[in-house]
Image (cartoon, grey):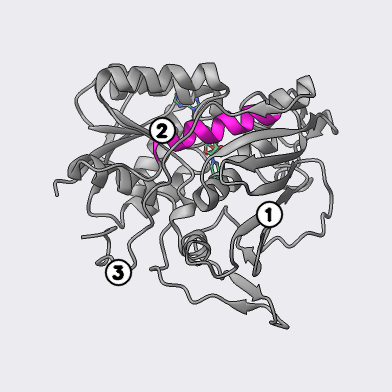
Amino acid sequence: MDPMKIGVVGCGNISKQYFRQAARFDLLDITACADLNPDAAQAAADEFGVTAVMGVDDLLAGDEVEAVLNLTIPAAHVPVGLKAIAGGKHVYSEKPLGVDRDDAAQLLDAAKTAGLHVGNAPDTFLGTGQQTARRAIDEGLIGRPLSFTAFMMGSGHESWHPSPEFYYKPGGGPMFDMGPYYLTAIVNLFGPVAQVAGFADIKLPLRTITHGSAENPGPLYGQTIDVETPDHYAGTLITRSGVTGTVVMSFACHHAPYDHKHPITVYGSEGAMKVPDPNGFDAPVLVMRLGDDDWREVACAHPTGYGRAVGLADMAQAIRAGRESRCSGALAWHVLDVMQGFLDSGREHTFVEMSSTFDRPAPMPTDPPPGLLDD
Ligand SMILES: NC(=O)c1ccc[n+]([C@@H]2O[C@H](COP(=O)([O-])OP(=O)(O)OC[C@H]3O[C@@H](n4cnc5c(N)ncnc54)[C@H](O)[C@@H]3O)[C@@H](O)[C@H]2O)c1
């Protein structure tokens, strides 16, 4: 297959992982990068050997690349994506797909009209943890799945991220930031969500950036952020397949004592399963069946070692092979619909029906040759 020339837009914190991981796939060739801050683009090019450092609009409109990897902040995902599509390029973006349904719908409509692909993070569900959990559930290891709990309870990102403001603006908060990992994992396991309900509010409205330390402060150390989107969600949902879930997503919990390694637990008619952190790729799945007296590890049938960029590689391969990509716009749209549903429910105190749906992506292959996803 011909490698796909990729241009990165947004060379901030997460871009390093993508530059490193993309180099592992023969199909991905990052030939250009750009950022609103030209120094960030230059630094990335120097560190990772990217040949062309370009202006953002030049990269999006020009002929240098076939696809754009959009690693900007959430509010820029759709504006940058729309320009990429207007420039005739496929686009794969970090999560969320957009800051709300209206925002994201523009991107999907434009891509459909132009006949271009939209892919979206997260791709962590392509790792061994989530793939092993899905396979075991599909094979009936815990019987019929009945319910689950999914907890992500932290105190926010202002202690470690150099510029954490976007986490507290629309398109951020724990639901739009971490929800994509959890909800993508959930719908990959059980299929589309039918209904959601919950409370969503702002618990800690003023945040102080403490990245760095008093002796060695980060660039924004000591500055404050006004929180403009809920920082705590307590919700419930039911999937079309009848699985009921309890979902807590919070940036307002100090020292939360839940199981960080296995934050999702699935309860089935014949046992229970501990599903590993959906913000990672490779970790063990644990199961306790009826009659067992302890948890045991489920044998992992998938290759380990994927990292961020595997979803982009999958999209490139899907485009070349004419198949569906796994981290598709349709999946990201459903996840956004669910996240927005929680927000709407919290504001209006109603149950919210999901109008979107999607087809569960194909499972990952179990024996791909090195550096590839499948034959
Ligand atoms: N930091 C993480 O650990 C992490 C992990 C997973 C996903 N993400 C996601 O990745 C995205 C980026 O996060 P980050 O932590 O790298 O943020 P960041 O602020 O460190 O980097 C974003 C970069 O995008 C640039 N940018 C912003 N708007 C732009 C525009 N319109 N055009 C061109 N460049 C623009 C900024 O100058 C900055 O260099 C977010 O959507 C975030 O949710 C971050």
Taking the spot 71% from the left edge, 43% from the top edge, the residue there is: 211
Q: Tell me if residue 335 is in the magenta stretch.
A: yes
Whether residue 29 is visible here, answered yes or no, is no
Q: CA distance from mark 3 to mark 2?
A: 26 Å
- Label ID, residue 115: none
The answer to whether the residue bearing label 2 lies less than 8 angstroms from the nearest atom of ligand 1 is no
In the depicted structure, whether residue 339 falls above or below residue 239:
above
Earlier along the polypeptide chain: callout 3 or callout 1? 1
Earlier along the polypeptide chain: callout 3 or callout 2? 2
- Label ID, residue 367: 3
Describe the element under mark 1 as helix, strand or loop.
strand
Is 265 displayed left or right of 27 in the figure?
Answer: right
Residue hosting label 1: 148
Magenta segment boundaries in residue numbering: 328-342
Q: Nearer the viewer, residue 190 or 116?
A: 190
Residue at the farthest left position: 2
Magenta segment, prevailing SS (helix, strand or loop): helix
Q: Position of residue 81 (x, y in %)?
A: 39, 24
Residue hosting label 2: 329
Q: Nearer the viewer, residue 57 or 134?
A: 134
Q: CA distance from mark 2 to mark 1?
A: 25 Å
Describe the element under mark 2 as helix, strand or loop.
helix
Q: Position of residue 160 (x, y in %)?
A: 68, 46
Q: Position of residue 274 (x, y in %)?
A: 65, 65
The answer to whether the residue bearing label 3 lies less than 8 angstroms from the nearest atom of ligand 1 is no
Task: Give neighbour class at mark 2: few <14, some 14-19, many 20+ (Cα, 10 Å).
Answer: many
Describe the element under mark 3 as helix, strand or loop.
loop
Taking the spot 70% from the left edge, 27% from the top edge, the residue there is: 343
Is 74 displayed left or right of 232 in the figure?
Answer: left
Counting every numbered tag in the picture gives 3
